[in-house]
Image (cartoon, grey):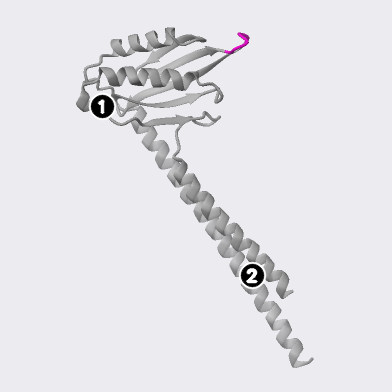
């Protein structure tokens, strides 16, 4: 065996070991990123549960009866809303489709840690319809108009699309950071594969 052959063989083994180590690091990083994203989602779900389960404290000049009355008034002015039910500060509405053959639902949650501030969280079965957003905006404006001026806060609309598992809002900025990590890891994997092809 020539000295040159030993060099090429050991370089191939070293290259393979380096590639395996790099692949292990990439897999570990992806797994770590996934666990961090899962932890963020769980923390957001816990905070959402805390917000939703906060006891009602309507001490800002609007009673629950006034809230229900405002919701009913705006619903009566909104085309195709067939009925609403109010559960605390959460409004569930049924909307008739344009064909009048089917119905779909949406919910607007005005419970801001037990307070009625005009902020809301919206979930809808129909992402294409403007009815839920229009209804929620009108009711939010009516609430803010009735609140004393020092209690009115800047608008904070949290719109979510329902999924089979939950209707919790998730901030988009966390998802973009997770996506960036995945892109970086994908580029590293591609470079490692290219390096492996060059070596072999």
Within 10 Å of disc 1 (Cα), the crowding (few <14, some 14-19, many 20+) is some
Marking on residue 152: 1
Compared with 131, 176 (above or below) is below
Question: Disc 2 or disc 1, which is closer to the eye?
Answer: 1
Which x, y percent locates residue 97? 58, 13
Which residue is rendered at x = 68% and y = 81% of the image? Answer: 11
Q: Residue at x 45, y 38 (%)?
A: 170
For the residues marked 2 and 1, what is the alpha-carbon distance in whole angstroms? 59 Å
Picture coordinates of residue 43 (x, y %)? Answer: 40, 42
Report the residue that reaches farthest toward the right. Answer: 1
Circles 2 and 1: CB atoms closer than 8 Å: no
The answer to whether residue 10 is left or right of residue 77 is: right
Q: Which residues are magenta?
A: 97-101
11 and 134: which one is in front? 134
Residue drawn at point x = 63 percent, y = 10 percent: 99
Q: Quadrant of residue 42?
A: top left
Query: Which element is circle 2 on?
Result: helix
| Side of 185 where 49 appears, left or right | left
Image quadrant containing the C terminus: bottom right
Q: Quadrant of residue 92?
A: top left
Across and down, in percent, residue 182 comes to 56, 53
Q: Which comes sooner in the sequence, label 2 or label 1? A: 2
Query: Which residue is found at the position 37% from the left and 36% from the top?
Result: 47
Q: Is residue 175 above or below residue 91?
A: below
Tag 1, which secondary structure?
loop
As drawn, 178 above or below 122: below
Q: Which residue is mark 2?
A: 19
Is the N terminus in the top left, top right, bottom left or bottom right quadrant? Answer: bottom right
């Amino acid at each position: 065996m020539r000295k040159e052959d030993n060099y090429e063989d050991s370089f191939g083994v070293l290259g393979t070991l380096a590639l395996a180590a790099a692949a292990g690091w990439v897999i570990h990083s992806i797994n770590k990123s996934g666990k961090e994203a899962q932890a963020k989602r769980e923390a957001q779900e816990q905070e959402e549960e805390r917000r939703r389960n906060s006891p009602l404290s309507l001490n800002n000049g609007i009673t629950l009866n006034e809230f229900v009355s405002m919701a009913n008034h705006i619903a009566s002015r909104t085309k195709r809303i067939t009925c609403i039910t109010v559960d605390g500060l959460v409004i569930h509405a049924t909307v008739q489709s344009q064909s009048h053959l089917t119905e779909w639902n949406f919910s607007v949650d005005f419970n801001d840690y037990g307070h009625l501030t005009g902020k809301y969280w919206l979930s809808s079965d129909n992402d294409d319809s403007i009815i839920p957003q229009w209804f929620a905006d009108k009711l939010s404006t009516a609430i803010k108009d009735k609140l004393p001026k020092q209690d009115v806060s800047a608008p904070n609309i949290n719109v979510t699309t329902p999924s089979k598992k939950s209707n919790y809002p998730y901030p988009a900025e966390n998802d973009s950071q997770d996506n960036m990590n995945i892109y970086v890891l994908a580029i590293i994997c591609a470079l490692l594969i290219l390096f492996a092809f060059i070596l072999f």
